[in-house]
């Protein structure tokens, strides 16, 4: 019994010596560059160029966002029924773009049709196209 207590005390003492008193958590920078303000400023006027029935790649290309989505610079999530499926894109702090598509066709996303676009948040720059 004394040996067990002695081993436990030894482990505790050695553990206390080897551990820093105030360990600092590692810092990891996971931030991605936001979509530039010049691109954001061009989105509101381009919303009018979107036509019902366009595919998601066509919509994103029209809005000038394909490059940023392909680089993984934009956080996106979605939901809803297939006939009114929405995707929310966090383009920059306070700048959210919500796109809705009808994906209820026989091939799902292969047969998607644009329904609507909504801008949300208070971080959108003034609507000044290039």
Image (cartoon, rainbow, N blue to C red):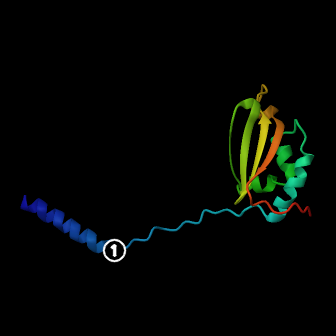
Question: Residue 100, percent across and down?
Answer: 78, 39
Which is more toward the observer, 112 or 81?
81
What SS does tag 1 mark? loop
Question: Residue 14, percent across and down?
Answer: 24, 71
Residue at (55, 66) in percent of width and height: 28
Residue at (87, 39) in percent of width and height: 54
Residue 121 figure quarter: bottom right
Residue 97 vertical position relative to residue 102 in the rendered view, above or below:
below
Residue 53 vertical position relative to residue 64 in the rendered view, above or below:
above
Quadrant holding the C terminus: bottom right
Residue at (70, 55) in percent of width and height: 72
Quadrant holding the N terminus: bottom left
Residue at (72, 62) in percent of width and height: 34
Q: Residue furthest front?
A: 122
Residue 107 vertical position relative to residue 31 in the rendered view, above or below:
above
Question: Residue 111, percent across and down?
Answer: 81, 32
Q: Residue furthest left?
A: 2
Total number of numbered discs in the rendering: 1
Which residue was labeled with disc 1? 21
Q: Is residue 115 left or right of residue 75?
A: right
Q: Is residue 61 left or right of residue 73?
A: right
Which is more toward the observer, 66 or 42?
42
Tell me if mark 1 has few (under 14), some (14-19) or many (20+) residues whose alpha carbon lies within 10 angstroms of its own.
few
Question: Residue 109, percent across and down?
Answer: 76, 34
Q: Is residue 83 left or right of residue 127?
A: left
């Amino acid at each position: 019994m004394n040996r067990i207590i002695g081993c436990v005390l030894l482990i505790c003492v050695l553990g206390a010596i080897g551990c820093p008193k105030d360990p600092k958590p590692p810092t990891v920078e996971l931030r991605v560059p936001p979509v530039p303000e010049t691109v954001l400023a061009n989105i509101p006027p381009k919303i009018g160029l979107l036509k019902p029935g366009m595919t998601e790649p066509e919509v994103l290309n029209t809005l000038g966002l394909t490059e940023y989505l392909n680089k993984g610079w934009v956080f996106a999530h979605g939901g809803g029924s297939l006939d009114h499926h929405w995707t929310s894109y966090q383009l920059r702090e306070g700048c959210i773009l919500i796109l809705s598509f009808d994906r209820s066709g026989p091939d799902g996303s292969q047969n998607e049709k644009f329904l609507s676009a909504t801008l949300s948040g208070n971080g959108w720059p003034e609507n000044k196209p290039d």
